[in-house]
Image (tube, rainbow, N blue to C red):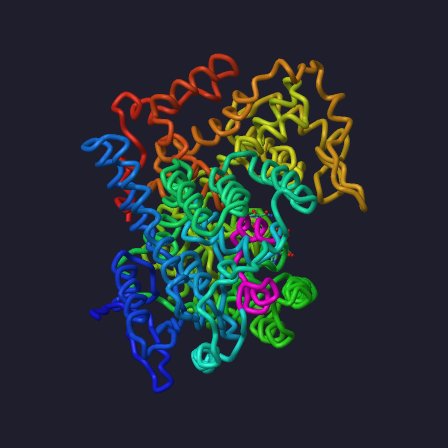
Amino acid sequence: MNLQNFKFETDSDGVALLTWDMRDRSMNVITLEVMAELEQVVDAVVADAAIKGCVIASGKESFSGGADLTMLEGFSRQFAQMLKTDGEEKANQAFFDGSRKLSQLYRKLETCGKPFAAAINGVCLGGAFELALACHYRVVSDNEKTRVGLPEVKIGLFPGAGGTTRVSRLMQTGDALQMLFKGDQMRPQQAKTMGLVHEIAPVADIVAKAKAWIVAGGKGVAPWDAKDWRPPSGRVYSPAGMMTWPAANAIYRRETMDNYPAVKAILHCVYEGLQLPMDLALRVESRWFAKILRSKEAAAMIRSLFVSMGDLNKGARRPKNVPPSKIKKVGVLGAGFMGASIGYVTAGAGVEVVLIDRDQAAADKGKQLSHKLMTEQINRGRARTADRDALLARITATPDYAALADCDLIVEAVFEDRAVKADVTKKAEAFMRSDAIFASNTSTLPITSLAENFSRQDDFIGIHFFSPVERMMLVEVILGKKTGDRALAMALDFVRAIRKTPIVVNDTRGFYANRCVLNYIREGHIMLDEGVPPAMIETTARMAGMPVGPLSLNDEVGVDLGWKIVQATKNDLGAAAVDPREERILDALYNKNQRMGRKNGKGFYDYPEKAPKKLWPGLADLQSVKLDPDTLDVEELKQRFLTTQANEAARTVEEGVVTDPREADVGSILGFGFAPCTGGTLSYIDGMGAKAFVAQCERLAAKYGPRFTPCKLVVEMAEKGETFYGRFAPGKAA
Ligand code: NAD
């Protein structure tokens, strides 16, 4: 055998060990070459009577991250080419054949007659876990970092190499659907409880355990290929099946609003597959996979949530001229709502933290948050007491600025008040190392003007977190006029260390994410003023793909904050910059009814203590007109929500605030949940084409007002037939 990606050896017991260890890659991935070599191995194991069976393990720290997505993209490119040269039927056939090769290879392994066992350490995800599922026995290590799962759905795909078919044959249908819909990664114990793996062992023993199973006579027959096999939940057409399927459909609709074809395909594969013998079920799964792989949703999600996000996480915008820095200690000024959480995520990444507030009690209160959040983790079984102790030991809570002396980076998160910020910046500078970077977490104040309080303005930068910091994955890094490369590089190194995704934006009011999301919330306010039923506002927003309705979102961030932002905008930019309908709604809620949102238990919703939140009935009194829901155009309401955000995103590009479309797209999904199925704000425009987008804007502007007027940039792009990804080729800005 000529193997480049594997090592193959057979021991004296006649058990083969196939060690997957790709050269020049830190992680094993499934490529066409890997597939060809694996096929050779299966043939060799079958052909050699002296070989009893085979264990598949990895020579790296992890088993494998799954299929190489560029291989899948290659199929799509080939398809587009064949469509032109050979016609639709041939192109479809070739695409189907190509995209099911992996599924067929795994089935070949599963039915070859000899037992295969997988010995898994570290991550084993996607196509790699599908390989493990096709093996007849699975041993996983008890390592902290071991995770198995099928996360394909998160990028608009589904486990199409037998994953849905095997998982639904291994466990109860409801559990299988939940696992496939969510795409979560599982720890060893959870995977064992769910019946996905057979054995957990210390990493040093996994190969031996897998071999021992073969030596002890482990059979090369999958449960579903045995004669007496029955599906775990019984037949689809049975009373039990009828308890599952209507609910599964309803859950699918509720969770996706029918925006995610891959999730629907999972339902189809499981429902249809469970009624068929294994080989036919796999064929049906392959048909769905070929369809989904060519969907525009999968293409958009793979680009934004896998390729672009990966690029940004790896430092696509990091200045190449600055050597990598290791951030060991970070000072956080202000141990309030944001500062306390920033301290927590920083310490959680193994970095020392100095948490400063006005007095010891305030600093201690901030540190207390870390205790609380870690305790929650312990209670959920996700951390140990020792982890909490270690994390807390990394945080020094103090009012003493002298403790900042050996920090590499300071993040300021005190009150949003220029004078307070100026004061703490100066105090900190007096003790900071002369090469340390100073960052502000301001949400509204220009970084360039805050930098004036610091003598080394090139070492001053914005690092803007989103709340709740421990859950929100996006961080905006803001460049002031004088911010230098070293500050940018260190800010990006810090964001990487705390495992969040950075986007780099230039300094303007609202930066990027807040500008777009404020438009979204405003559209909800305006619809309320127009007389659209509140429930319809919330539901159509979710139908458009947003994770929460605009009124809910306003309640989460605070109706009081909404009011303050509108007032600040009016003061700074004049009355014309504010929509009077939005001001009236916010005034009625906040000033006239003291409804501040979730924080005081009343906002656009009521928050009863022991019941789910409900829209506040008083909203009806704020509507002088009440529109009949049956006369409203749902598609148009959806378009209004997405268009107002996408147009604003395009405007940030026009103004040079955002310079790379990858950042606009990734930032919009991670920062404010912009319909992930579209690939993000700019992909939404590129997806329909600038011309169609401009037409949509103009139609909405004629009917609803100039806030929908398309920005100059998209009009120009429409005229020239350009796309964002074409005109602003990713990476150009770096
Ligand atoms: P907060 O009021 O909860 O916390 C501010 C903290 O700063 C308080 O603990 C206060 O005691 C402390 N402080 C005030 N003056 C100080 C001084 N002179 N020295 C030391 N500590 C001092 O406010 P927050 O919501 O955490 O906001 C902090 C910053 O983060 C603001 O700039 C805000 O714009 C920004 N921000 C907030 C959010 C959000 O969702 N709340 C999101 C992004 C950014």
**480 or 251: nearer the eye?**
251
**52 or 208: nearer the eye?**
52
Magenta residues span 175-197
Residue 18, position as x, y percentages in the image? 33, 73
Residue 448 at least partly seen? no
* Above-or-below relation of 639 to 51: above
Please identify the residue farthest to the bottom as the structure is shown: 12
Q: Residue at x 46, y 43 (%)?
A: 446
Is 622 colored magenta in this rendering?
A: no
* The N terminus: image quadrant: bottom left
Residue 391 at least partly seen? yes
- From the viewer's perspective, tell me whether residue 223 is left or right of residue 311: right
- From the viewer's perspective, tell me whether residue 325 is left or right of residue 605: left
Please identify the residue farthest to the front as the structure is shown: 227
Residue 182, position as x, y percentages in the image? 55, 50
Q: Residue at x 47, y 12 (%)?
A: 702
Residue 561, position as x, y percentages in the image? 63, 39
